[in-house]
Image (tube, rainbow, N blue to C red):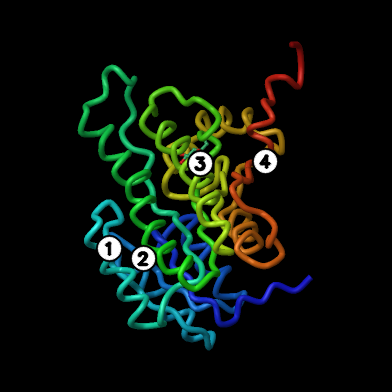
Amino acid sequence: MNIDLSGKRALVTGGNSGIGAAIVNALSDAGAKVAINYVSHPEAAEAMTQAIWDKGREAITIEGDISNDNQVEAMFKRMDECWGGIDILINNAGIDGAEAAGWKMKAKDFQEVIHINLLGNYYCARQALRRMTAQKSGVVLSTSSVHEMIAWTGHSAYTASKAAVGMLSKTLAQEAAPYNVRVLSLAPGAIKTPINKNVWDNKKGLDDLLEKIPLGRIGEPEEIARMAVVLVSDVASYVTGRTIYVDGGMTDYPDFAHGG
Ligand code: BGC
């Protein structure tokens, strides 16, 4: 099976680091033109863009805070100006947020996570869907998390935001399906990126994490990126309104490998 995304115009939010960066490179390798959105570290986005041009493919960078609706609108206008629209949105930017028990968390910390992970996701999805439903084609793929399903002490805003992203995608999928537009989510488990470096970077944290993963290892960003390419391609032409878990079995409740 050959996946060819030539001619497709993709936007990856939070595309200059972690899972987003791996998805940018994988989409580009599959032939897509890729816009790399970033909110900080422009130099990382520029270096990625240069590397893509060096390989003979097209990429642009677009600065923009996804939690700001005006900036999101400007980002999609830039897509229109540069490439005449969009075919693939990877709705990826997000944060884990501050760690605290729900009742001890500052409201502003809770709000920040919801603003970025949920409202930001929505602002981007609706700009993309306006364009995709009009052209009667396109795919919106959101980066969710195993914490769409698994509770996580200290991270109530994050888990709530990811559960909400899952249901937002399902509902948007139902609304967009008559227009030949697919909307779905990809839920990574523990993947080695800067977002969770504080956990995998020390032995105690890593040992604890590995116990939670049946495949016995932390995932690589490329393992998420490969699935993202499949899901936005025609290989997955009949898949919509679902969250696909790519988590080394984390949601298979490894504690039940014994007892019960
Ligand atoms: C979080 C990571 C965490 C992983 C598994 C992800 O959604 O962003 O920080 O390591 O879930 O718990």
Q: Quadrant of residue 228?
A: bottom right
Counting residues from the start of the chain, the first of labels 4 and 1 encountered is 1
- Give the residue displayed 51% in from the left and 34% down from the top: 147
Counting residues from the start of the chain, the first of labels 3 and 1 encountered is 1
Q: Which residue is mark 3?
A: 166
Counting residues from the start of the chain, the first of labels 4 and 2 encountered is 2
Q: In the image, which is nearer the foreground, mark 3 or mark 1?
A: 3
Q: Secondary structure at mark 4?
A: loop
Callout 1 amino acid: Gly
Q: Which mark is residue 248?
A: 4
Callout 2 amino acid: Asn
Q: Tell me, yes or no, whether the two marked residues, 4 and 2, touch with CB atoms within 8 Å.
A: no
Q: Secondary structure at mark 1?
A: loop
Q: Which residue is mark 1?
A: 64
Callout 4 amino acid: Gly
Counting residues from the start of the chain, the first of labels 4 and 3 encountered is 3
